[in-house]
Amino acid sequence: MQQSELAGLLKDIEYRQSQLNNIKARGIQSRDSVVTTLQDFSLNQNLNINIEKISEVILFSGNNERGIVEMLQSIFISNKKYSKILATLERFNDVKRIIGKETTDVNIMRDDLLVFAENNFPQYVKEIEQNLSFISKSFEAFKATMKEKFNIIINLSVGEIVQLN
């Protein structure tokens, strides 16, 4: 689910970048383009992995086999990277409010925010792409280790709830 969320955020940022490029190319700032570019990011903070519960089950089942601790560490790091991306994008939302408090001139505020977005969107894309790759590889390694160590095949089911079968 974290992978899906990050892929959606990546597409959102890429679309906002295209809107920003249109604004710069035309020199005209349509209200819709500006709103789309500068709207708050919608962030799902509820997709954190409960590492304590996973580690209890895996360490108990694993009988201290090699690779188990590394697998748990990789899940922990993936979760941390996901949270870091959300924190970065939340700062974008916060900057909007800070700039709004510092100036009463809407035109200056809009221009400052567009410059901020222009300077930061490429870094957001880079950060998400790098961490999405790590998270994806970690999940694949997790599935492979579960198959190898415990003969458990992990399939992701999406229905009313998402669960590992």
Image (spheres, helix red, strand yellow):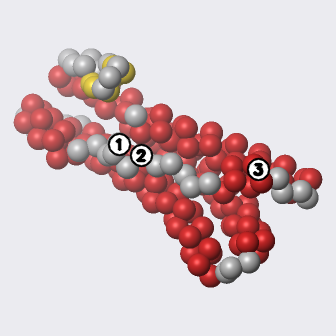
Q: Quarter of the image containing the N terminus?
A: top left
Q: At 76% from the left edge and 75% from the top edge, which residue is drawn?
A: 108
Crowd tier of the residue under label 1, counting other residues whose Cα lies within 10 Å: few below 14, some 14–19, many 20 or above: few
Q: Amino acid at mark 3?
A: Ser
* Mark nearer the viewer, 3 or 2: 3
Q: How much space separates mark 3 and mark 2, taking CA atoms?
A: 24 Å
Between residues 4 and 63, which one lies in front from this camera angle?
Answer: 4
Q: Amino acid at mark 2?
A: Asn
Q: How much space separates mark 3 and mark 1, taking CA atoms?
A: 30 Å
Residue 112 seen by the camera: no
Q: Are marks 3 and 2 in contact (CB under 8 Å)?
A: no
Q: At 57% from the left edge and 75% from the top edge, which residue is drawn?
A: 98
The residue that mark 3 highlights is 33
Secondary structure found at label 3: helix
Figure quadrant of residue 23: bottom right
Q: Is residue 87 above or below residue 131?
A: below
Please count the marks in the image: 3
Crowd tier of the residue under label 3, counting other residues whose Cα lies within 10 Å: few below 14, some 14–19, many 20 or above: some
The residue that mark 1 highlights is 47
Crowd tier of the residue under label 2, counting other residues whose Cα lies within 10 Å: few below 14, some 14–19, many 20 or above: few
Q: At 11% from the left edge and 41% from the top edge, which residue is drawn?
A: 56
Residue 3 seen by the camera: yes
The residue that mark 2 highlights is 44
* Mark nearer the viewer, 3 or 1: 3
Secondary structure found at label 2: loop
Q: How much space separates mark 1 and mark 2, taking CA atoms?
A: 7 Å
Q: Amino acid at mark 1?
A: Leu
